[in-house]
Every structure is written in structure tokens, then in C-alpha cells.
Image (cartoon, grey):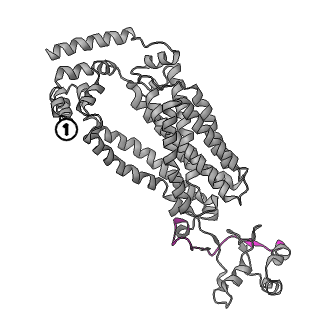
Amino acid sequence: MAFGDLLEQVGSTGRFQILHVTLLCMPVLLMASHNLLQNFVAAVPPHYCNAHTNLSQSQLSPEETLLITVPQDQKGKPQKCQRYVTPQWHLLTKNGSDGSGEDGDTKEGLDVDLQGCRDGWTYNMTDMSSTIISDWHLVCDLRSLKQMGQTVYMGGVLVGAVVFGGLSDRWFHESSRWLVMSNKPEQAIKNLKRVANFNGRREEGEKIDIKMLRESMTKEMSCSQGSYSVLDLFRTPTMRTITVCLSAVWFSTSFAYYGLAMDLQKFGVDIYLIQVIFGAVDIPAKVVITVSMSFIGRRPSQCGALILAGVTILINLLVPYDKTTTRTCLAVLGKGCLAASFSCCYLYSGELYPTIVRQNGMGWVSMMARVGAMVAPMVLLTGEYIPWLPGLIYGGAPILSGVAAIFLPETLGSPLPDTIEDVVDRGSGRSSKMSPKEAIILRDTQANLIKQAA
């Protein structure tokens, strides 16, 4: 009997498990809103330079003041970060004669000296009351601080995962599996019986004794005799291949995901509406990837989700900016593929890493995802110099990692590996054989268990 059989005996999907999953879902639901909060609190409102201070007492209308103080850009809108050094009063006459200031801007305005917004900015707060952009004036020369703020936030998520992940081990250490491996079988039995009672399977729980518990944990106890670290993720060629490929998959998935999800204003539609659409597309995406993983396999599902996401992002670069509906649809499709990739890589990674280093492996790839989320906002800054470069990077990364995922072994229908040798044998197509060292450890463990049971 394996330990999993004991869990089935006390009720593997009973009231106890449902209650705990429900309680865990509550903070998870709030976490997503925190990660995407900057889309709203750091939205950039339309803005232009304030008028010169000597115009504050003038009788000009706001439109006339804007006309003589701020030049227009190529799209006919007020420039965001420059104004005339001195008010251009002659534009009022031209504006009165032909109905626009375009002539003055394009002819005489070419030789007019410009300066930065020395007296601050005026913000159009029609869609929102305030943001950190308008409160702290994070525009023009300080606009990069918006992306830096998101990077710092993701860095805090990474540090928090390391710190609080270690603290949470104190709770997980109270699991029955850990108690047996820590030579506390009595407490483990007590916990299992409590779960059985909660699930309404009291009679099955009473059948569990120390001998049954130790026999179910024999193999895991033999594997736990050694000491394993993150270095074991790179110790053999097979483990190196798995770790490098999974690192690329997790990094690019998170990188492109937050690259799309944290730049909603570029689509030119209401940010609240597109956020709802971006969130809703995750539901069908996760359903489709679940079916795909179950019938097609983990590897083709992972590769397909990443490559399709990258292709849609690259195609979006070719769509004219005014085609907002087309651009939005492609972005939603790409976002859904990246959400599907997240679901796949969580399951796939757990099946690829053996039991003895699974926790280290999942911690490593999760860290790579946090690094990807940290880098994603900074890539947006390259758009200030080459507008199409962020899209090229966001689209190219998933495609490259999707190709890298081809080198991962398929795990559909395969048992979870317990040792590194199991992983190597699975990759070579051989049946798993126990090494002499593991055989000795297992034999000694069994002898000790027999003595303790007696």
C-alpha cells in the first residue's frame, strides 16, 4: 500500500479537502487584483504643459490659452512635454481668421523656441479622479518611474515568496507525510484519523495503525535519507535539460503575460472593459488546455500554447493602430494562450521533477516566473525609442521557449518519478531500476522499520 492509498482511505476529496481548497482560494482571488492594480492606479491621463504664470490673470479661455502656449504634435493634439518659451499671441489672430492654429504651428511655429513644462502639467481627469501619475507627476522625464514601480512590486513578490515560503513550511511540516518521515508516526495517525472523521469515514480511519503507515512510506523514507539541493536540478544531463527548458517556459510565460496585461491603454479602448475581457478569456483557455493535456499530451499542449501566443503578439505589430477591434481580439487570444501556458506548466513541471527534488524544482521555476514579471515592465521603455520593439520581444520570447519545450519528455500516463534515476530512465525509455546505493538504503530502512514496529 502506498501513502496515496491511505489518503484515499480517509477521503481524498472529502469535506476536509474541499474546505481547505475553498479557504485557499480566497487569498488567491485577491492576489490577481493586486498584481494588476497598476493598470488603474497608474493609468496615464491625457496631459499637457501648464500655461506660463504671467497668463494666470488673463481673460483668455482655456482653449485660447492652450493654443498660444502648447504646440501641437503630428496628430494635431497638444504636445505632452513641451510648450512655447513665450506665448505665441499671433496665433490668436490666425486662429480667428481661419479657424485653427495649424498654419501658425506648421509655418511660423517651426522656428519658435520650446521648453519643458516648467510650471507643471494639466491633466484631463474625465475618466478617473486621480492616479499616481497625476499626483506625483510621473510623466515626461519621470515616465520611466511608472514601469520601475511595477518592477519593484514584482521584486517584492519574489522576496515575499522566498521569505514567507520558508515560514509556511512550518505549517506544511505538520502534514502526516512529514510527521512519519520525522519519526512522529503517532501524531501522523492522529491527523489522518481526524481527517477521516471530518470526511465521515471514521471506520476506515480507525483501521490505520503504525505498521500500515510505515509500510506505505517505505520508499519515500528511503529517498529522504540523502540531502538534496537546487544543485541537483543541474547534476545530470537529463535534469539540466529539464531545468533549463522549464526555466525558459516559466520565464517567457510570465514575461509575455504581464507584458500584455500591464499595458491596457495601448489598445485605445476602455481599460475597464478590456480588463474584464482579459480576465474572462482565462476561463475557456484553461478549459481548452485541460482537455488538450488530457488527450493530446503535456508537451504538445505546452509548445502549442506558447508558440500560438507569440505568433498572435507578432501579428499584432502589423495591424494599424486605428484597427482597435482587430488589435484587441489578437491581444485577447494571446493573453488566453499565455493563461493556458501557465496552467500547463504548473502541472507539467510537477510531473517532470522527481519527488526528492520536486519542491526545489518548483521553487526554482517559480522564481524564474517572478524574474520574467520583473523584466516585463522595463521592456516597455524601449518603445520610447523603437515603437515596435516591445511587441517583438514579447512575441519572440514565447516562440523561442515553445521550441525549447519540445526537448522536454512527455509525461501523460506516466507515473510520478521518485528519484533522479527514474527521470533519466523515463527520458531514455528504460524501466526504472534502483541503484545499488538506493537498494542498500531501502534495505536498511526496512530493517529499522521492522525493529521499530516490533
Does residue 371 appear in the picture of this structure? no
Quick one: quadrant of the C terminus?
top left
Q: Residue at x 58, y 25 (%)?
A: 407
Q: Is 148 a magenta residue?
A: no
Principal secondary structure, stretch drawn in magenta: loop
Is 308 positioned to the left or the right of 14 in the image?
right
Q: Residue furthest right?
A: 107
Q: Nearer the viewer, residue 247 or 30?
A: 30
In front of the other: 54 or 72:
72
| Number of on-image labels | 1
Q: Is residue 427 visible?
A: yes
Query: Which residue position is annotated with label 1?
Result: 200
Please state the horizontal and vertical placement of residue 64, each as a whole percent of the image.
71, 84
Along the line of sight, the residue nearer the viewer: 52 or 79: 79
Indicate the quadrant where residue 91 lies.
bottom right
Instruction: Answer above or below: position of 267 versus 366.
Output: below
Name the residue located 75 percent from the left edge and 73 percent from the top edge. 71
In the figure, 449 relative to 306: above or below? above
Q: Is disc 1 placed on a helix, strand or loop?
A: loop
The vertical placement of 194 against 138, above or below, is: above
- Residue 61 spot, x, y in % from top left: 67, 87
Residue 54 locus on image (x, y percent) = 67, 85
Question: The N terminus lies in which quarter of the figure?
Answer: top left
Above or below 15: residue 121: below
Q: Is residue 166 left or right of residue 269?
A: left
Q: Residues within 10 Å of mark 1 (few under 14, many from 20)?
A: some
Q: Is residue 112 magenta?
A: yes
**Based on the displayed image, in which of its 4 quarters is residue 133 positioned?**
bottom right
Amino acid on which the number 1 mark rests in the picture: Gly
Magenta part of the chain: 110-133
Q: Residue 66: image x %, image y %?
A: 69, 79
